[in-house]
Image: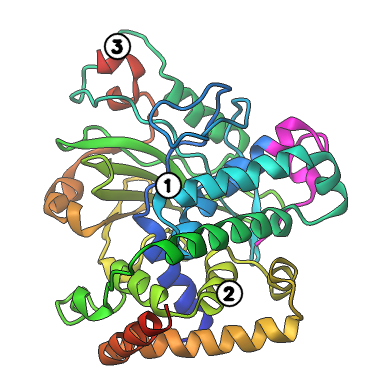
Amino acid sequence: MTVHENDAYGTAPGSDTEFTRFAEVMWPRFVRAGVLMGATQAEAEDAAQDALMKCLRSWARVSRTEDPVAYSVKILQNTVISRWRRRSASEVPTPRLVADSNPSDGAGIDDAVTVRAALTKLPLDQRTVLVLRYYLDLTEAQVATVLGVPAGTVKSRTHRAMRQLEHLLTDPAAAQSAAEHQEGLA
Amino acid sequence: MNENDLRVKLHHAAEDIPVPALPLETQPRKSATPRRFVVLAAAAAVAVVAAGSFTAGTLLADEPPATVSPAGTGPDGATSAAAEQLRRQLEELPGIPFALPTALPDGYQWHGTDSFLAEPDGGPVVMRSVVFTLDEGEGTAHVCAAATDRAAQACPISPSAEPIRRTLPDHTLVLIGLTAKAAGDRSFWESVDLTDDVEQPWLAEDSAS
C-alpha cells in the first residue's frame, strides 16, 4: 500500500489535518492487522494507537523524510510482537486447531475463522510477513524496511509462508501437527 | 494459492474483526483499557491509498448510535453527525453514492463506512461500502455499492461468502455480505429498500432517545 503524495490529501504537508486523514485510513487496518498477527483485540487496539501516537509526535519529520506507512507499521509490528511474547511467556497456550472449524461444513477452507486459525499456526516471522504484505498491502521494500531485513529475505520468507499457509488450509492434519509442534516449542 | 488469492483470504479473514471508532477526543475513552488516551482532532474521514491502478482506501468507522430506531421515525429535521459525515465524504470523494437500507433488522447497528475504490488520477469513486454490526459485533453486514462488475470485485466481501447481489434501477450493483452470525437475516437484506439518501432514521443521533 502506498500513501499518495501529500497533495492527494488536499492539505499542507506535515499538517495536523494531513495526519488525521492518514490516521483515519490506517486505524482500522492497524487494528485488524494486529489481530491477524496474533494480538488480542485489546492489544491490537492499543498497538494501533501507540503506532499512531508515535507517528503523530514525529509527523512533521516523518511525513517529509520517511515513508509514514512503513514507519508506523514498524511501531505497530514491534508493539504487537513484544506484547505477544510477553503474553506467550506468561500464559498456557490454548490450541485452536484449524480442524476445529470444520472445513468441510460447506463454508469451505475460505472461512475467515479457518484462515485466522491457520495464521496462528505459522511461525511468527512468517505470519507477520504475510499480514504486512497481503493484508496491509505493503511493498516488498516497505516490508524490508519494517522488518529490518533485505528485500531478498522478505521474498523468500513470503514464499515459505505462503506455502506453509496453503498446506495448513488444505490439510487439517498438518495444521494440528503444526499446532502441536508450536506448543512443544512454547 | 497465488498472491491475489491470499490477499482475498486475509482481507476476508479480517472482515469481522471489530474496529472501534478512531479515538477523536482528548479525553480518556469510557470503556477502554487504562492507557487509552487519544490522539486526534475530529475531521472528515477522507484518505487516499493507492492500490494498483485504482485509488482505494478505508474510511473511518463511525461511532454507532447507542440504539437503533425503527425505520421512518427520524427526528424532525435533525441532521445527524453520521449523516453529515457521509455527506462530507461524498463531497470530498465524489462518485457513486452509498447504498443504504431504509430500515435495519432487529439487533443491527450502524458501524460506519469501510472501503472505497476510485479511478486513477483523482477519478470518481466507483465502489463504496458500509458496515452494520449485529449484536454488538457478533455478526456483520457489509453493503457495497459498485458502478461496474470490475469495481464490485473490490468490495470487501469474499466471494466465498456468497454475497447477495442486487441491481438498483440506476444500474448500481450492490453486494451484501453477511457473516455467519448474520446469515439468518439474508431474506431481509435481499428485499429491503436501498437508497442513496443519507438521512436515515437509524443514522440520526437523536433517534436513540
The foreground one among A66 and A42 is: A42
Cα gap from disc 2 to disc 1, whole angstroms: 22 Å
Left-right relation of B47 to B186: right
Q: What chain letter is assigned to the residue under label 3?
A: B
Q: Residue at x 36, y 69 (%)?
A: A116
Q: Could one spot residue B128 in this view of the protein? A: no
Cα gap from disc 1 to disc 3, whole angstroms: 35 Å
Left-right relation of B61 to A101: right
Q: What stretch is highlighted in magenta?
A: A1-19
Kindly identify which numbered label has been placed on residue A60.
none
* For discs 1 and 3, the disc positioned in front in the rendered view: 1
For the N terminus of chain B, which image quadrant?
bottom left
Q: Where is residue B122 in the image (x, y as percent from the top left)?
A: 69, 48
Work out whether B60 lies above or below B74.
below
Work out whether A155 lies above or below A139.
below
The secondary structure type at the circle numbered 1 is: helix
Q: What chain letter is assigned to the residue under label 1?
A: A
Cα gap from disc 2 to disc 3, whole angstroms: 49 Å
Q: Name the residue under label 1.
A: A42
Q: What residue type is labelled 2?
A: Val
The secondary structure type at the circle numbered 3 is: loop
The secondary structure type at the circle numbered 2 is: helix
The foreground one among B18 and B117 is: B18
Kindly identify which numbered label has been placed on residue A129.
2
Q: Name the residue under label 3.
A: B75
Q: Residue at x 59, y 71 (%)?
A: A133
CA neighbours of label 3 inside 10 A, class few (<14), some (14 to 19), many (20+): some
Q: Are marks 2 and 1 in contact (CB under 8 Å)?
A: no
Residue lying furthest top: B76
Q: Could one spot residue A29 in this view of the protein? A: yes
Q: What residue type is labelled 1?
A: Ala
